[in-house]
Image (cartoon, rainbow, N blue to C red):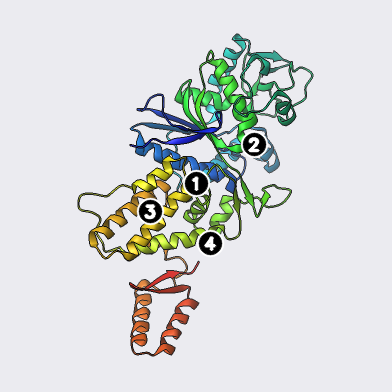
Amino acid sequence: MQSIHLYNTRTQRKERFIPLDSARVTMYVCGPTVYSYAHIGNARPAVVFDILARLLREEFPGVVYVRNITDIDDKINAAAVEQGVPIDDITARYTRAYHKDLEALGVLPPDVEPRVTTHIPRIIDMIQALLRSEHAYEAEGHVLFHVPSYSAYGQLSHRNTDEMQAGARVEVAPWKRDPADFVLWKPSTAEQPGWDSPWGRGRPGWHIECSTLADVHLGETIDIHGGGHDLIFPHHENENAQSTCAHGGKPFCRYWVHNGLITVEGEKMAKSVGNILLVHDLLQRMPGEAIRMALLAAHYRGPLDWTQDSVPRARRGLDRLYQVLRDMRDIPLPEEGTDGPPSEFMACLRDDLNTPRALAVLYGLVRRAHTSTDLKERSRVKSELLAAGEILGILQQDPEVWFGGAGEALDNAEIERLIRRRESARAARDFQTADAIRQELLEKGIVLEDGAQGTRWRVEK
């Protein structure tokens, strides 16, 4: 079996993935803060780490994948005030919306999906451990992590002290011992959500939440921590520092994996620009599988520019793949059982999740299906295509369902009848009638494609 290699942000190189315990591979990925609908940038890590989890399960007998829900945050508080509803209404509504969006994108649920608000006592325990080890201190109702107490701070993000202080966007407060120190616990007003603690009524800081949830559900040292590139600093840098210090210097994470960010038509997504693309809105206009396919078009570590052609191009690619499955609908799968994905396909994914190369292998299967006349070979291609699609989270629909959208005005039998009429007209060299039938179908959203194996049809996207 070939090894999986992943790019480790901390070491800045691709490394062979060797879990601490091959029977229990652990992965933690930062989930959403549920105050609004998820945008396409939020969807990218969900899809990327869904595929990584699927790959890990192909290779190892036991995988525990944790993706959290942040349901306490100042943005949630502000949304509740703005809409005049309780905070729980906001978090419940947008958690449901997040789940619905990801389901439409073919993202499988994680093994564990902890919420911050159900772990407050454990968060307090970790803060107390940091206070006992003198990596944290109290100041005016706050508890802060003292960054200079951890000499390896900055090794994940590869920033020096000046860069970190300039880029941290830290709150300037006279009670901080060092400008880079960050909040573990902060006081709550009467209007804000809060919990009793040794430091008074308050609520946790953002960074300590993920450290605690990873510790509770995966242990002191985890194999993989994932998230978007924008989380490397300060969130993951702070997580790493406080987790390492709370556990007596034990390493927190062995492989840090980060996906690149999404731009829209070459610009950063921003409310001020008005170009934030909500998954909820995109799904009103296009199938989730095509959105997922568009997210796989670029290597996960690189940037992805979302353009007007991103989804149409992805749909055309899916048309090619589904069309060959439809052409082979009457071909049985191998009698000895379903073949796994092609070895070349798996090699691409084991090489730091190279989805563009993996997709190229799938299109190679399409070419094999078109050129082969051997029944066993075509059966093998069909099996490999379905198995590879399952790991990528695509090609799991019936092809007729995929092609059914825009052509609902005509049922399949009527389309096939018109195609036979056109073939008869062409055989009689009545090209005027044949062209008229093609045009009639085109006006109803059906595109005909003539090839060596006859005429195929697809729904125009």
Mark 2 surroundings within 10 Å by alpha-carbon count, few (fewer than 14), some (14 through 19), many (20 or more) = many
Q: Residue at x 61, y 57 (%)?
A: 307
* Above or below, comparing residue 448 to residue 361 in the picture: below
Residue 145: percent from the left, percent from the top?
65, 18
Quarter residue 33 falls in: top right
Q: Which residue is mark 1?
A: 102
23 with respect to 194 (left or right): left
Q: Which residue is mark 4?
A: 312
Q: CA distance from mark 3 to mark 4?
A: 19 Å
Q: Which residue is mark 3?
A: 396
What amino acid is found at the position of numbered circle 1 in the picture? Leu
Q: Which one is in front, 111 or 117?
A: 111
Q: Residue at x 28, y 60 (%)?
A: 378
Q: Which residue is mark 2?
A: 76
Q: CA distance from mark 1 to mark 4?
A: 20 Å
Q: CA distance from mark 1 to mark 3?
A: 16 Å
Q: CA distance from mark 1 to mark 2?
A: 20 Å
Mark 1 surroundings within 10 Å by alpha-carbon count, few (fewer than 14), some (14 through 19), many (20 or more) = many
Residue 194: percent from the left, percent from the top?
64, 25
Can you tell which of label 1 and label 3 is closer to the viewer?
Answer: 3
Can you tell which of label 3 and label 2 is closer to the viewer?
Answer: 3
Can you tell which of label 1 and label 2 is closer to the viewer?
Answer: 1
What amino acid is found at the position of numbered circle 2 in the picture? Ile
Residue 171: percent from the left, percent from the top?
74, 26
Quarter residue 191 falls in: top right
| Label 1 secondary element | helix
| Label 3 secondary element | loop
| Label 4 secondary element | helix
